Image (cartoon, coloured by chain):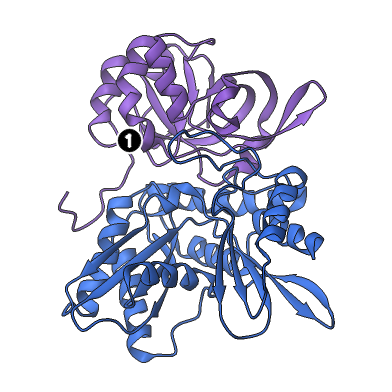
Chain colours: A purple, B blue
């Protein structure tokens, strides 16, 4: 299994192929609908968004800080509307989520050099085990699930390279589809 | 009673019901695709870890939904208090917001939340089934043509699942409601999700419809987390009501693999939490 350090440079993600299984270590920033929208409206964010995790964690106060108890991915399709803006403005190279984007997003990922990794949906307890600490949190006024949580993770995964930066995807095209 | 309700909520969000675990294990045993099998293994590993640590298996602890059987009187304030306490003590993620301002209430309660459904008759019990957004966002209801038979109903359900693709965290569980009025069909689709996996309708025509839907949905090839494979759906149950001669409402509720539910029942004078 390959191991990726975050933030990842374009060169290190360009060799990843759809279907590869990887783990990542470093800093992830959670962002959902509202955080994406605000970051793009302001055209800035209080923290680097090179590695974005579609997640609204379940957290508990621990002394002055926070403890993450369950932190699986949320449905990435909701953030597809903000994808190109995110990559263009913030230079994101790694997005982690679940469920993937539509086929049209493959070209966006390829043009900007970004890879989409899938963490098993619903596996919140497993994900939390790889979160070593909450570094900081921003935009908490959006509500706990919608805030930007900066998480330090170690050996986060296994993650499936679901949509690579070369136009490849592992998502099955359902049979007898008309859409 | 309040402690029992908090325990009900805790059990539901922490412990994957045994019928779901068994269904995932059976799916894993039958799976040949490597990535699909990996997802099923991780789902089972996650459930075991959550139970061991006593933490919610999925961070989306959902919209709190209660189903009351038997006579309960004005129990809504008690259910809301149980949700508030569970939010602090389990804890649950605060998920509930105003529909327009999107302001989070912070304690998982609000107008008409927790959702409370009353099922008349039977022995007194309280079921809790938190509803996550990933799968609920893919649920659908529609008035089908009154002459649509089992084939068109199965086709409608399969189409809903096909459009959902990888979004609802497959393999999914499907609750289907047919007949009644539109809101009744939707409620029946939720009640169908409470039934244990591995069971089927006592009405032969409905049991045949359940098998047909399962077959069609599993032939879609979406697979665990959308990576292809044999298992897109762990189980289907259909509940029905008679309806107007000119209509056929059909509702399908999608549930993620993390199909969490538990019931509080009275045994020998004390309350006990059970799971299917």
- Circle 1 marks a residue in which chain? A
Q: Position of residue B272 (x, y in %)?
A: 78, 72
Q: In the picture, residue B267 is in which quadrant?
A: bottom right
Image point (43%, 48%), residue name: B225
Question: Eyeballing the image, is B97 above or below B34?
Answer: above
Indicate left or right for B2 with A91 as reference.
right
Question: Eyeballing the image, is B3 above or below B87?
Answer: below
Q: In the picture, residue B202 is in which quadrant?
A: bottom left
Indicate left or right for A12 with A112 as reference.
right
Question: Eyeballing the image, is B237 above or below A140?
Answer: below
Q: Position of residue B100 (x, y in %)?
A: 43, 37
Q: Position of residue A63 (x, y in %)?
A: 83, 24
- Bin the neighbour count of mark 1 within 10 Å (Cα to Cα): few under 14, some 14-19, many 20 and up: many
Indicate left or right for A179 with B2 as reference.
left
Q: Nearer the viewer, residue B149 or B20?
A: B149
Secondary structure at badge 1 equals loop
Image point (24%, 79%), residue name: B150
Q: Nearer the viewer, residue A79 or A118?
A: A79
Please give the residue where the numbered disc 1 appears in the rendered image: A101
Image point (30%, 70%), residue name: B250
Question: Eyeballing the image, is B69 above or below A179?
Answer: below
């Amino acid at each position: 299994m390959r191991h990726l350090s975050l933030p990842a440079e374009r060169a290190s993600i360009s060799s990843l192929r759809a279907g590869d299984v990887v783990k990542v270590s470093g800093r992830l920033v959670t962002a959902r609908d509202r955080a994406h929208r605000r970051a793009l409206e302001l055209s800035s964010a209080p923290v680097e968004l090179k590695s974005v995790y579609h997640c609204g964690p379940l957290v508990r106060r621990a002394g002055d800080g926070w403890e993450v108890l369950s932190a699986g991915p949320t449905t990435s399709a909701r953030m597809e509307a903000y994808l190109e803006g995110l990559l263009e403005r913030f230079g994101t190279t790694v997005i982690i989520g679940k469920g993937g984007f539509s086929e049209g997003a493959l070209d966006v990922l390829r043009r900007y050099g970004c890879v989409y990794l899938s963490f098993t949906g619903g596996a919140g307890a497993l994900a939390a085990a790889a979160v070593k600490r909450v570094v900081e949190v921003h935009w908490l006024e959006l509500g706990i699930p919608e805030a930007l949580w900066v998480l330090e993770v170690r050996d986060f995964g296994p993650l499936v390279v679901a949509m690579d930066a070369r136009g490849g995807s592992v998502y099955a095209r359902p049979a007898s589809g008309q859409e | 009673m309040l402690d029992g309700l908090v325990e009900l909520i805790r059990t539901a969000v922490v412990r994957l019901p045994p019928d779901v675990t068994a269904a995932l294990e059976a799916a894993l045993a039958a799976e040949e695709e490597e990535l699909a099998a990996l997802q099923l293994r991780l789902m089972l590993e996650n459930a075991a870890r959550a139970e061991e640590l006593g933490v919610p298996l999925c961070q989306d602890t959902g919209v709190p939904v209660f189903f009351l059987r038997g006579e309960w009187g004005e129990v809504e304030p008690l259910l809301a208090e149980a949700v508030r306490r569970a939010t602090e003590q389990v804890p649950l993620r605060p998920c509930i917001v105003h529909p327009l301002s999107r302001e989070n209430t912070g304690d998982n309660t609000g107008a008409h939340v927790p959702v409370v459904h009353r099922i008349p008759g039977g022995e007194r019990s309280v079921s809790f089934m938190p509803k996550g957004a990933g799968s609920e966002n893919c649920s659908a209801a529609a008035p089908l043509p009154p002459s649509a038979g089992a084939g068109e109903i199965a086709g409608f359900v399969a189409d809903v699942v096909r459009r959902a693709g990888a979004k609802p965290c497959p393999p999914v569980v499907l609750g289907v409601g047919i007949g009644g009025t539109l809101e009744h069909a939707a409620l029946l689709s939720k009640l169908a999700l409470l039934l244990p996996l591995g069971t089927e309708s006592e009405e032969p025509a409905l049991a045949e419809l359940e098998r047909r839907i399962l077959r069609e949905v599993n032939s879609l090839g979406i697979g665990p987390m959308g990576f292809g494979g044999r298992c897109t759906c762990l189980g289907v149950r259909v509940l029905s009501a008679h309806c107007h001669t000119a209509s056929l409402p059909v509702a399908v509720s999608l549930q993620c693999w993390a199909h969490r539910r538990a019931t509080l029942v009275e045994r020998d004078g004390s309350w006990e939490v059970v799971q299917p």
